[in-house]
Amino acid sequence: MREADILNFWARIAERIASPIHKQAKNQLYSMKKKFLSVYRIKKQWPGNNSFYKKRRIFPRTGMPSSIATQFY
């Protein structure tokens, strides 16, 4: 067994232990990523219409104000 195989084995075990705990966090991250991408796609289509995005709260669940969120794209 190479060192990489051993590391891989332990990583898989750690993943299995952590998966029920982290499932919710993973889903939250995934939904945030989806929101980022969808907003980014909309913003790319209408680059002139920026005031609309600043007024709207993009991340209501995380409580992140849109002024912070606009820094990401």
Image (cartoon, rainbow, N blue to C red):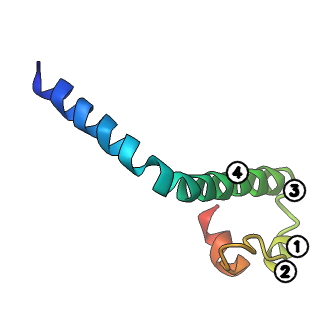
Sooner in the amino-acid sequence: mark 3 or mark 4: 4
Sooner in the amino-acid sequence: mark 1 or mark 3: 3
**Label 1 belongs to which residue?**
52
Q: Nearer the viewer, residue 49 or 52?
A: 52
Circle on res. 46: 3
Give the spatial CA distance, label 1 vs label 4.
19 Å
The residue under label 1 is which amino acid type? Phe
- Classify mark 1: residues with Cα within 10 Å, few (<14), some (14-19) or many (20+): few
Give the spatial CA distance, label 1 vs label 2.
5 Å
- Classify mark 3: residues with Cα within 10 Å, few (<14), some (14-19) or many (20+): few
What percent of the width, then of the height, locates residue 48?
A: 86, 64
Q: Is residue 58 above or below residue 46?
A: below
- Secondary-structure class at tag 3: loop
Relative horizontal placement of residue 59, taking residue 30 as reference (left or right): right
Q: Residue at x 19, y 24 (%)?
A: 5
Q: Residue at x 65, y 74 (%)?
A: 62
Give the spatial CA distance, label 3 vs label 4.
19 Å
Relative horizontal placement of residue 46, taking residue 30 as reference (left or right): right
Circle on res. 34: 4
Instruction: Find out whether the residues at labels 1 and 3 contact each other: C-beta distance under 8 Å.
Output: no
The residue under label 4 is which amino acid type? Lys
Q: Residue at x 65, y 59 (%)?
A: 32
Quarter of the image for residue 63 reads bottom right
What percent of the width, then of the height, locates residue 42?
A: 83, 53
Sooner in the amino-acid sequence: mark 4 or mark 2: 4
Circle on res. 43: none
Q: Is residue 15 above or below residue 8?
A: below
Q: Nearer the viewer, mark 1 or mark 4?
A: 4
Sooner in the amino-acid sequence: mark 2 or mark 3: 3
Q: Nearer the viewer, mark 2 or mark 3?
A: 2
- Quadrant where the N terminus lies? top left
Give the spatial CA distance, label 4 vs label 2.
20 Å
